[in-house]
């Protein structure tokens, strides 16, 4: 699909971001369990600052089944997200809200690719229009989440095997969130 839609993005659009592998370094076969383990990917703070000037809303949607497995607590996750958002604010950016799904069950309505976190975001911010929203993630699950809501999608090549391309769930691909932000 053509990236011509990027030129139509303005403050009426919402940016949905996955967390692990998009905002922060992802631990292979494990979870970021505490604030000491959280490390931004290169350039992310400034990328979110740049994207904050373009998008009217920026929300994070993240599966966090480490909570459901008892490997971390919601308090641990809250500390991680407080650090993440405060560092982004220091760089001149913003995250309007962070949504997470602690469930292990892949059928849980909040667990991506299911759309429960998007529905909650729409309840919290009634101006969100999924047809004027963009999902940035690093898994096909993220892309399917976006597609199921009617969003445009951007795949970040940070980890995971790259899906066979072209893929119907992917509109654009970039090596990082910082590279995507440089489009604006």
Image (tube, rainbow, N blue to C red):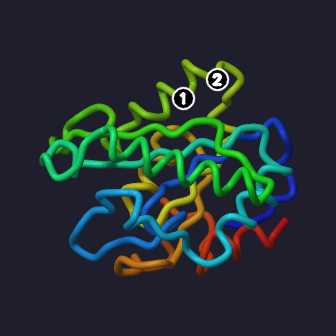
Label at residue 113: none
Q: Is residue 33 above or below residue 2?
A: above
Residue that protrudes farthest toward the front in the picture: 36
**Along the viewing direction, whichever of 89 and 6 lies nearer the viewer:** 89
Q: Quadrant of the N terminus?
A: bottom right
28, 107: nearer the viewer = 28
**Left or right of 127 in this view: 135:** left
Q: Nearer the viewer, residue 62 or 146?
A: 62
Image x and y of residue 47, in percent:
73, 65
In this image, 84 relative to 1: left or right?
left
- Whole-percent x and y of residue 169? 48, 59
- The dot on residue 121 is 1
* Element class at badge 2: loop
Judging from the image, what secondary structure is the residue with disc 1 in?
helix
| Residue under the image location 80 percent in, 54 percent down | 92
- Residue 179 location, x and y as percent? 70, 76
Q: Which residue is depicted at the point 38% across and 71% down? A: 26
Residue 62 appears at what percent x and percent y? Answer: 41, 48
Q: Is residue 78 left or right of residue 60?
A: left
Identify which residue is drawn at 67% across, 29% down: 128
Query: In the image, is residue 148 above or below residue 66?
Result: above
Residue to which mark 2 is pinned: 125
164 is higher (above) or lower (below) than 99: below
Look at the numbered discs 1 and 2 and tell me whether their residues touch, using CB distance below 8 Å.
yes
User: Tag 2: Cα neighbours inside 10 Å, few (<14), some, or many (≥20)?
Assistant: some
Q: Quadrant of the C terminus?
A: bottom right
């Amino acid at each position: 699909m053509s990236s011509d839609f990027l030129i139509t993005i303005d403050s009426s659009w919402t940016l949905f971001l996955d967390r692990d592998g998009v905002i922060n370094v992802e631990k292979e076969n494990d979870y970021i369990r505490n604030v000491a383990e959280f490390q931004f990917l290169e350039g992310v703070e400034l990328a979110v600052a740049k994207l904050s000037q373009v998008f009217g809303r920026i929300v994070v949607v993240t599966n966090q089944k480490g909570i459901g497995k008892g490997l971390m607590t919601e308090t641990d996750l809250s500390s991680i997200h407080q650090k993440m958002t405060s560092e982004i604010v220091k760089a001149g950016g913003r995250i309007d809200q962070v949504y997470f799904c602690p469930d292990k069950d892949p059928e849980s309505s909040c667990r991506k690719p299911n759309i429960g976190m998007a529905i909650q975001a729409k309840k919290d911010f009634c101006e969100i229009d999924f047809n004027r929203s963009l999902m940035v993630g690093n898994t096909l699950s993220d892309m399917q989440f976006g597609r199921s809501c009617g969003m445009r999608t951007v795949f970040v090549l940070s980890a995971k095997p790259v899906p066979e391309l072209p893929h119907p769930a992917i509109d654009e691909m970039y090596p990082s969130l910082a590279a995507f932000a440089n489009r604006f």
